[in-house]
Image (spheres, rainbow, N blue to C red):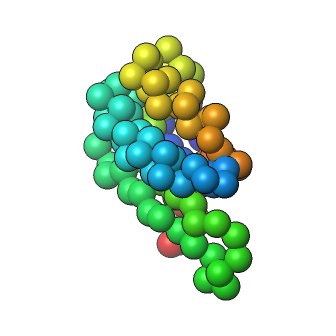
Amino acid sequence: MPSNQPFTNLVTYVPKPGCFDALEALVIKHGPALKASGLITDEPIRMWKATNKHGEGPPYFVETFQWKDREGPNLAMQSPEIMSVWEPIGEILEELTIATLEPIVGS
């Protein structure tokens, strides 16, 4: 994928025990911080509370958003507004997964 093309991230945030509410508050702030930075597209940011259908493991959060280009994540690290969310999120996460989504031809 060319570096100047938009791309979508799917992020999974699993909180440490006892940190669900704190993580939820930060995940809610994440979208507005990204929008204010101008580094993401106008595609809607989507967030969900997720649970394993078999009741295994703690609830967690899933988020999707679209960066304008490959430089976005690096430039985000220079944004005080975004870092004010990313740094405390890092302290209360059990697990973080960031996946880049690519459409499948024909879908």
Q: Report which quarter residue 73 is drawn in.
A: top right
The residue at the far front in this view is 18
**Residue 10 seen in render:** no
Q: Residue at x 31, y 37 (%)?
A: 32
Residue 87 drawn at (x, y percent): 56, 27
Relative to 73, does residue 12 appear above or below in the rendering? below
Residue 44 at x, y = what percent? 31, 52
Seen at 67% across and 85% down, the residue is 54
In the rendered image, residue 104, in percent from the top left (x then y), is placed at 58, 65
**Who is closer to the viewer here, 49 or 20?**
20
Q: Which sits in the foreground, 92 or 97?
A: 92
When the figure is inspected, residue 85 is found, relative to residue 99, above or below; the finding is: above
Residue extending farthest to the bottom is 54
Q: Residue at x 50, y 14 (%)?
A: 78
Residue 37 seen in render: yes
The number of numbered badges drawn on the structure is 0
Q: For this view, does 32 lie left or right of residue 80?
A: left
Q: Residue visible at 49% across and 23% down?
A: 83
**Left or right: where 42 falls relative to 93:** left
> Considering the image in quadrants, where does the N terminus appear?
top right
Whether residue 62 is situated above or below residue 53 in the rendered picture: above
